[in-house]
């Protein structure tokens, strides 16, 4: 029997009190009240748990995963090795950045490109496109 409101609770108590054995009546009333509070506490805990799950899911959307491609941008010149790289830090929505480091013996250049929905407003180098492709697979 579900207790919808305090009026139902009062009706139930009156019905239980009409039973001749007072000790049994009081035990039944206590049992009903204990279970009612447990149900109420359970509903509160469920709401709190649902809120926590919602917050965790929102946080998961903002976690950035990184992928890296290493390469030699100067292989056409016959110099260098795979000491340059492009690393993408992208969340589930496809937003983030690509950090590229171009290494040469006498200098190193760093480039940073913003990514929105797996696209960039700036032109991407082939290696940067390759690192973005890793997220789509």
Image (cartoon, grey):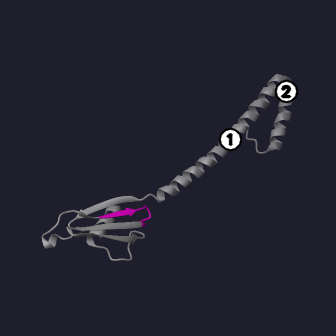
One can see residue 69 in this view: yes
Q: Indicate whether 4 appears above or below 137.
A: above
Pointer 2: residues within 10 angstroms few (<14), some, or many (20+)? few
Q: Secondary structure at mark 1?
A: helix
Q: Quadrant of residue 4?
A: top right
User: Which residue carries the number 1 mark?
Assistant: 41
The label number, if any, that marks residue 19 in the structure image? 2
Q: Quadrant of residue 67?
A: bottom left
Residue at 50% over, 56% down: 59
The stretch in magenta equals 86-95
The residues bearing labels 2 and 1 have C-alpha atoms spaced at a distance of 30 Å
Quarter of the picture holding the C terminus:
bottom left
Q: Nearer the viewer, mark 2 or mark 1?
A: 1
- Name which quarter of the figure residue 106 lies in: bottom left
Residue 43 place in picture, x, y as percent: 66, 45
Query: Quadrant location of the N terminus?
Result: top right
Label 1: how many Cα within 10 Å (few below 14, some 14–19, many 20+): few
The verdict on residue 93 being magenta is yes
Q: Are marks 2 and 1 in contact (CB under 8 Å)?
A: no
């Amino acid at each position: 029997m579900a207790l919808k409101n305090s009026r139902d609770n009062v009706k139930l108590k009156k019905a239980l009190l009409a039973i001749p054995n007072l000790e049994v009546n009081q035990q039944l009333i206590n049992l009903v009240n204990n279970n009612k509070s447990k149900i109420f506490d359970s509903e509160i805990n469920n709401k709190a748990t649902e809120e926590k799950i919602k917050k965790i899911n929102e946080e998961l959307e903002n976690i950035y995963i990184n992928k890296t491609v290493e390469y030699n941008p100067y292989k056409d010149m016959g110099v260098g090795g795979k000491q340059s790289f492009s690393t993408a830090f992208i969340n589930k929505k496809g937003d983030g950045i690509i950090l590229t480091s171009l290494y040469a013996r006498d200098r190193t250049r760093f480039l940073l490109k913003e990514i929105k929905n797996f696209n960039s407003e700036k032109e991407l180098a082939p290696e940067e496109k390759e690192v973005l492709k890793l997220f789509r697979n």
